[in-house]
């Protein structure tokens, strides 16, 4: 029997996580509540792909994919005060002292409420547009739908930041200004590097350019938070830039059916044809919903990885300078979002999606979140070390 070192809950032998609190359980020993004899250490496990990936990202902590904690508290009852504690964290008066920082895995839940709020607003505006044919609600419907998943995912990363040292005001600034700046940086890079068709070379070129554009802005935003430089806060800043990029880009894609509709409207009228606006609305909603569901595994997570890469490189060099972009520690992590982004845009993902709809994207989302969970675990190890606590 394994007893959780945090809540003392009994768990079956071999359990990796506590069945009550969800925190990881040390596998090398088992004690009873009274402090009885410890079981002999288990044999060394064979190295797996996850272990190899854990080594690749630079973690010296045992691989821990504790994905359950991302959802375990979402459907539990929470008070308004609990929500307010998340939104007011990170100020001079609300940042916890190192000794008060939670050492185990956070149990995020507020992101689910934020997502529900945006989905309800989107649904109400959808009714205005599709049921009552009120075109005035169309811009609001596009914005609510396009912002829902990126913003909710950004809040998830805020909740995962155990340090609680980045204020929500700072995060919103990075989301809006950083997100827009990353679009400008990306378009500037596209004006320099010509990209042809989206074959494999073109897809990976797009991945490199867009991830580089976001990474540049993440670097700029991190400069303003240099005194709070750690893995989890770097992840928050990266996620905020990626969320802004994703939200504004999705809103732009949702506008494309409207632009196309009016481009062909005059041509159709000249030939005695009438275009059905419902086709346009269907295309808008399809774009919003599809891109929304896919966004947590796209720009938000990709930019979060770049944020971690910059922090890791900065900690190894002792300075947050432009030289980080040629640092091996940064490039080692930066290549992950570039490759995943390239595969996302590549013909390979398209071929898989034609056979199994969205299967290619789902596989890439799974892969990026395996990396994210390993990096979160690495960030929590940093919390333990920085607060002079043993790894958990």
Image (spheres, helix red, strand yellow):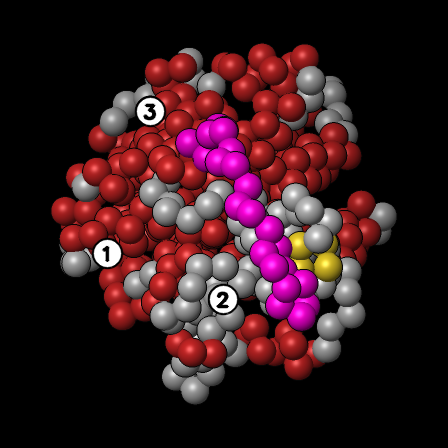
Mark 2 or 3, which is nearer the eye?
2
Q: Position of residue 216 (x, y in %)?
A: 27, 47
- N-terminal of the pair, mark 3 or mark 1, is 3
Quarter residue 339 falls in: top left
x 64%, y 52%: residue? 17
x 68%, y 13%: residue? 355
Note whether residue 248 is visible.
no
Residue 315's label in the rendered image is 1
Q: Is residue 164 left or right of residue 111?
A: left
State how far apart marks 1 and 2 are (Cα).
20 Å
At mark 1, the secondary structure is helix
Q: Nearer the viewer, residue 353 or 125?
A: 353
Task: Tell me, yes or no, whether the highlighted magenta stretch contains residue 33.
Answer: yes
- N-terminal of the pair, mark 2 or mark 3, is 2
Residue hosting label 3: 205
The span picked out in magenta is 30-52
Q: Position of residue 24 (x, y in %)?
A: 58, 54
Residue hosting label 2: 103
Residue 8's label in the rendered image is none
Q: Which of 117 and 145 is in front in this view?
A: 117
Task: Tell me, yes or no, whether the highlighted magenta stretch contains residue 32.
Answer: yes
């Amino acid at each position: 029997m394994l007893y959780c070192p945090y809540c003392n809950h009994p768990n079956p032998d071999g359990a990796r996580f506590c069945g009550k609190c969800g925190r990881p359980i040390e596998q090398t020993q088992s004690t009873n509540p009274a402090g009885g004899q410890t079981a002999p250490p288990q044999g060394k496990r064979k190295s797996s792909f996850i272990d190899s990936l854990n080594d690749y990202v630079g973690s010296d902590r045992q691989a821990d994919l504790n994905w359950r904690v991302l959802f375990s508290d979402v459907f539990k009852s929470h008070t308004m005060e609990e929500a307010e504690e998340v939104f007011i964290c990170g100020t001079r008066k609300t940042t916890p002292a190192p000794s008060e920082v939670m050492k185990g895995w956070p149990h995020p839940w507020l992101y689910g409420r934020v997502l529900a709020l945006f989905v309800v607003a989107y649904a109400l505006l959808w009714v205005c547009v599709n049921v009552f044919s009120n075109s005035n609600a169309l811009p609001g419907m596009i914005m609510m739908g396009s912002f829902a998943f990126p913003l909710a995912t950004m809040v998830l990363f805020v909740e995962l930041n155990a340090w609680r040292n980045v204020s929500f005001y700072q995060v919103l600034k990075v989301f809006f200004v950083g997100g827009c700046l990353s679009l400008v940086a990306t378009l500037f890079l596209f004006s320099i590097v010509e990209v042809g068709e989206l074959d494999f070379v073109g897809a990976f070129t797009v991945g490199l350019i867009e991830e580089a554009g976001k990474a540049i802005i993440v670097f700029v935003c991190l400069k303003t938070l240099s005194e709070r430089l750690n893995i989890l806060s770097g992840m928050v800043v990266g996620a905020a830039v990626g969320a802004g990029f994703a939200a504004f880009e999705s809103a732009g894609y949702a506008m494309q059916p409207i632009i196309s509709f009016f481009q062909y409207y005059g041509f159709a009228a000249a030939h005695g044809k009438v275009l059905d606006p419902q086709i346009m609305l269907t295309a808008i909603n399809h774009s919003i919903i599809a891109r929304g569901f896919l966004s947590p595994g796209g720009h938000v997570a990709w930019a979060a990885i770049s944020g971690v890469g910059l922090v890791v490189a900065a900690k190894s060099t002792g300075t947050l300078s432009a030289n980080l972009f040629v640092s091996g520690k940064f490039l080692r992590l930066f290549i992950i979002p570039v490759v995943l982004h390239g595969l996302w845009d590549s013909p390979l993902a398209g071929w898989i999606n034609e056979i199994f709809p969205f299967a290619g994207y789902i596989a890439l989302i799974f892969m990026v979140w395996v990396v994210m969970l390993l990096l979160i675990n690495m960030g929590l190890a940093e919390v333990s070390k920085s607060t002079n606590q043993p790894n958990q």
